[in-house]
Image (spheres, helix red, strand yellow):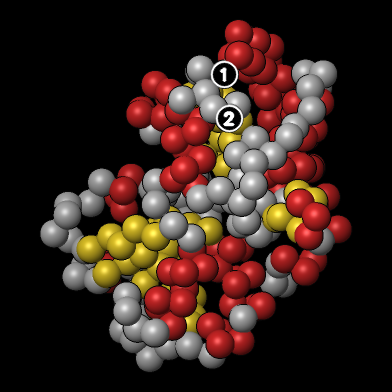
Amino acid sequence: MCIDHYPPLQVILPDHIVTGENVELTKKFVERMGLQLTFTENTPFKRCLHLLKHGLVDIMAGLTDSDERRQQFHMLLFDESMLKTFFIHKGSNAIDSFADLAGLSIATLRGAKHFKEFDYANDNYFAKVEVNTLESAFRMLARKRIDAVISTDYYGDYLLEHNKELSDKIIKAKFAYTDKTHTYIAISKKSPFAKKIIQFEHVAKEMFDSGKFKQLIFEFRKSHPQYYID
């Protein structure tokens, strides 16, 4: 499994102990297939996508959908409620709607997809600034080098909660993408495990339909409150 440090979804602790929402549900998922996970070192998201595309890693979790990704990966649904949020510098103009993004420079994780209106906006509508890590994006925002950052709400909240130098300067914008954003486990079509995709699909569907994936996410949130803000 290719991972980067992205609390609370993927958390790399000392001694390379790995946990997080995505990690724990993927562990249980592959265990049902009689398999175990090993993990990459902390690997930038864009690099993970490259490794997955070429079958150099087998699996990632937490990807949003696209036609391009379905050509390269088997996409297995596990959640349909991820919230994408914008963060801005205190004192800057409010972002109350998508229209307020016009003319802004907005940092986004390199290789990430968010929602169609944002992903496929005209290049002249706003400027996307691709970064290797969202932590660097938030630090750029704190220094007013960009106007906004798009992130999952939990990760942005986590960064602000644990970095006073950021929370003193950054707030969450009112506008967030509230429609359902589906997130997936992705298995490389070039992975040797892809030959078992019918079984993977069956197990994933059963875990999604039964609510097992949601249960695993809930259990992680309950047992790791340090990664969340009430």
Give me the residue at 30% from left, 62% from top: 129
Mark 2 and mark 1: span between their CA atoms? Answer: 7 Å
Quadrant where the image shows the N terminus: top right
Label at residue 191: 1
Nearer the observer, 12 or 198: 12
Give me the residue at 43% from left, 69% from top: 137
Determine the residue located farthest toward the left in the rendered image.
Answer: 124
Label at residue 57: 2
> Splitting the image into 4 quarters, where does residue 46 fall?
top left
Give me the residue at 49% from left, 47% from top: 45
Give the secondary structure at mark 2: loop
Quadrant where the image shows the C terminus: bottom right
Mark 2 or mark 1, which has the lower sequence index? 2
Give me the residue at 27% from left, 69% from top: 105
Give the secondary structure at mark 1: loop
Label at residue 76: none
Horizontal placement of 129 versus 137: left or right?
left
How dense is the environment of label 2, judged by Cα within 10 Å: few (below 14), some, or many (20 and up)? many
How dense is the environment of label 1, judged by Cα within 10 Å: few (below 14), some, or many (20 and up)? some
Label 2 with label 1: CB-CB less than 8 Å: yes
Residue 49: x and y in percent read: 47, 37
Nearer the observer, 170 or 93: 170
Residue 76: x and y in percent read: 58, 27
Observer able to see residue 181: yes
Horizontal placement of 188 versus 90: left or right?
right
Residue 60 in the image: above or below residue 147 = above
Tell me the amino acid under the disc marked 1: Ser
Residue 94: x and y in percent read: 35, 80
Residue 33: x and y in percent read: 77, 18
> Splitting the image into 4 quarters, where does residue 128 fall?
bottom left
Horizontal placement of 13 versus 5: left or right?
right
Observer able to see residue 19: no
